[in-house]
Image (cartoon, rainbow, N blue to C red):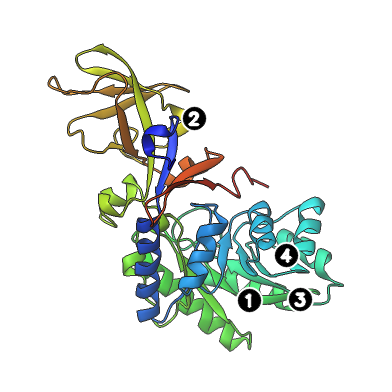
Amino acid sequence: MALTLNDIETPAFVVNEERVLRNISKFQNHCDARGLKLRPHIKTHKSIRFAKAQIEAGAVGINCQKIGEAEIMADAGLNDILITFNILGAPKLARLRALAERVTVRVVADNPVVVSGLSDAFANAPNPLGVLVECDTGAARCGVQSPAEAIELAGLIHQSPGLAFAGLLTYPAVGGQADVVTFMRETRDGLSASDIACPTISSGGSPDMWQAETGGVITEYRAGTYVYNDRSLVERGTCTWDDCAGHVLATVVSRPTRTRAVIDAGSKALTSDLLGLDGHGHVIGHSGSRIVGLSEEHGVMELPEDSALAIGDRIHIVPNHVCVVANMFDQAWLQTAAGDIVRLTTDARGRVT
């Protein structure tokens, strides 16, 4: 007998495949029309199934944040991988070297210490490791702080045994695309004056993805959240509720007062991420209801006086930040395009090293 959502124990993460495939196709078409190579970030879905769907739609490769994610994807046949995290330490560098011997892999660096370690690990490799300089164009996370620093670090990579300078990369501040273009143009021109080729200039981010343009400079775009979408992107106007493919399915387990209900999804299902929003997710189909508090296993809902929610009712919640929520579950429940309910393994779940 075919499964239905009523057969699934809660809390659960439910993914609508038709919406996922639509999201993949829509943004791939946007990038194709603007001459941008799309390299989706698998940190959101962590799924071999959806990584392959993105490649089949036209993506040039995938973006991973950690070696562990990349190893899972390489094992499944994904063979063009960019890791956007400074890699330090002998154990990680040994894993990176082993990975690079079976797939095309590139990494980033924003300081000479990381470059030195990469060079030591790849000095006698059969092929040089491609390294992009990560640039801080306004997000105030990792990255060199100026075009001059980027040019200097690119020169160091260019001269380091075992390495090849592969380009420039940034994760910009929301609304910061103009700053990206200015920073990258100045850096590219400085590299050209130093006779250093810059094959890739990579930007990214789902919040501004519909504004993604080359600007005459950017060659590649990276985005992750767009595959599922979430409340934070709806609130920014990036998508609509109908574009949100990942929901947390929860059950009302208590109704202590007329204006309070308790569900079985707490911080271990919805996470505590607010992303500047009020409450812990959007409850679909229950206007005026808010998830106002979380403990580990309980979610507390504030209800309107006339709410008909009863003990045993099930609700669908669009999480604030779907990337973290997806990583909370060993498996999701996939509503397939054919209408079936099947298990979807979160293949790279918990791969934090």
Q: Amino acid at mark 1?
A: Ala
Q: Which residue is mark 2?
A: 268
Could you give the CA–CA distance between mark 1 and mark 3, rounded to whole angstroms?
10 Å
Q: x and y percent of residue 57 in the render?
A: 45, 72
Who is closer to the viewer here, 337 or 106? Answer: 337
- Of all residues, the one furthest to the front in this rendering is 1
Find out whether the residues at labels 4 and 3 contact each other: C-beta distance under 8 Å: no
Q: x and y percent of residue 114 in the render?
A: 71, 60
Any part of residue 271 in sight: no
Find out whether the residues at labels 3 and 2 contact each other: C-beta distance under 8 Å: no
Could you give the CA–CA distance between mark 4 and mark 2, rounded to whole angstroms?
37 Å
Find out whether the residues at labels 1 and 2 contact each other: C-beta distance under 8 Å: no
How would you rate the neighbour count of disc 1 (Cα within 10 Å): few for under 14, some for 14-19, many for 20 or more? many
Establish if 93 lies above or below 353: below
Q: Amino acid at mark 4?
A: Val
Query: Dot 3: what SS?
Result: loop
Q: Which residue is mark 4?
A: 115
Disc nearest the viewer among 1 and 4: 1
Q: x and y percent of residue 52 in the render?
A: 54, 65
Could you give the CA–CA distance between mark 3 and mark 2, rounded to whole angstroms?
42 Å
Q: Which residue is mark 1?
A: 166
Q: Amino acid at mark 2?
A: Lys
Quadrant position of residue 273: top left
Establish if 129 lies above or below 245: below
Residue at (41%, 74%) from the top-left corner?
182
Could you give the CA–CA distance between mark 4 and mark 3, rounded to whole angstroms?
13 Å
Could you give the CA–CA distance between mark 1 and mark 2, rounded to whole angstroms?
39 Å
- Of all residues, the one furthest to the left in this rendering is 306
Give the left or right position of residue 77, taking residue 258 as reference: right
